[in-house]
Image (cartoon, rainbow, N blue to C red):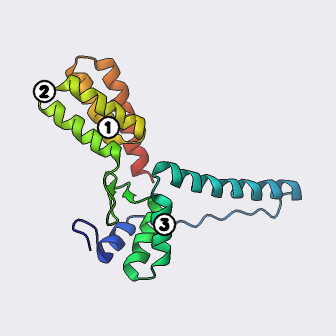
Amino acid sequence: MEAGTPGEAKLKAMIARFVPVEIKVDVSHLPPNELAALHKMVEAATLFDTLFLRQSAPQNEALLAQLVRDASPLSRARLHYFRINAGAWSRLDERAPFLPGVREKPAVVRTALGYHLVALDRVDEAMPPLEDALKLDPYCTPAHYRLAQALETLERPEIAQRYLREAARLEAEQLNR
């Protein structure tokens, strides 16, 4: 196992943070045309899941296929967590990769670069990587937060507030999942 990659016990603990919820709905009262439409919507949602997986990281489909083929307990735990996160990055752990051979997402790397440039008081240089991070992943909460910090340093509080509000909204959304 690759250093830093969670083992089976750790993955099971990570999975346990998510509580399965069964959603039931009575569709017996729907007329046939509405029932047919509902089935089409479910089919479309399945296609969107596939598209999302493909668009969020080009290697996701290959990683998923690899996990499906491996029946080991560790691979089953990895597959379960992969399906929860719709990819190889843990959404509850600042998008840290949890599969061997998977690197940090580019948005996280650019956010880290921006953070370090701000810390070195090179705020103007920090702006492009932080803005790039949000272009790569508009849901990257740390990028919103770090960009707000940089904008505060540049004395642009009104714009900084917009990014802080978005970081807070994304964080609250994450906690409510």
**Label ID, residue 113:** none
Rounded to the nearest angstrom, the CA distance separating label 1 from label 2 is: 17 Å
**Callout 3, which amino acid?**
Leu
Residue annotated with mark 3: 64
Mark 3: secondary structure: helix
> Badge 2, how many Cα within 10 Å: few under 14, some, many 20+?
few
In the rendering, at what x and y percent does residue 8 appear?
33, 76
**Label ID, residue 143:** 1
Which image quarter holds the N terminus? bottom left
Task: Give the residue displayed 38% in from the left and 54% down from the top.
Answer: 91
Residue 102, located in which quarter of the rendered image? Answer: bottom left
Nearer the observer: mark 3 or 2; the answer is 3
> Badge 1, how many Cα within 10 Å: few under 14, some, many 20+?
many
Residue annotated with mark 2: 121
**Callout 1, which amino acid?**
Ala
Task: Give the residue displayed 30% in from the left and 41% down from the top.
Answer: 142
Q: In this view, does 128 lie to the left or right of 64?
A: left
In the depicted view, which residue is nearer to us: 144 or 174? 144
Task: Give the residue displayed 28% in from the left and 17% down from the top.
Answer: 156
Residue 92, located in which quarter of the rendered image? Answer: bottom left
**Callout 2, which amino acid?**
Asp
Residue 115 vertical position relative to residue 20 in the rendered view, above or below? above
Q: In this view, does 153 lie to the left or right of 106?
A: left
Task: Give the residue displayed 82% in from the left and 58% down from the top.
Answer: 36
In the rendering, at what x and y percent does residue 99 appear?
35, 65
In the depicted view, which residue is nearer to us: 145 or 73? 73
Residue 29, located in which quarter of the rendered image? Answer: bottom right
Say whether disc 1 or disc 3 marks the residue closer to the N-terminus. 3
Mark 1: secondary structure: helix
Of all residues, the one furthest to the left in this rendering is 120
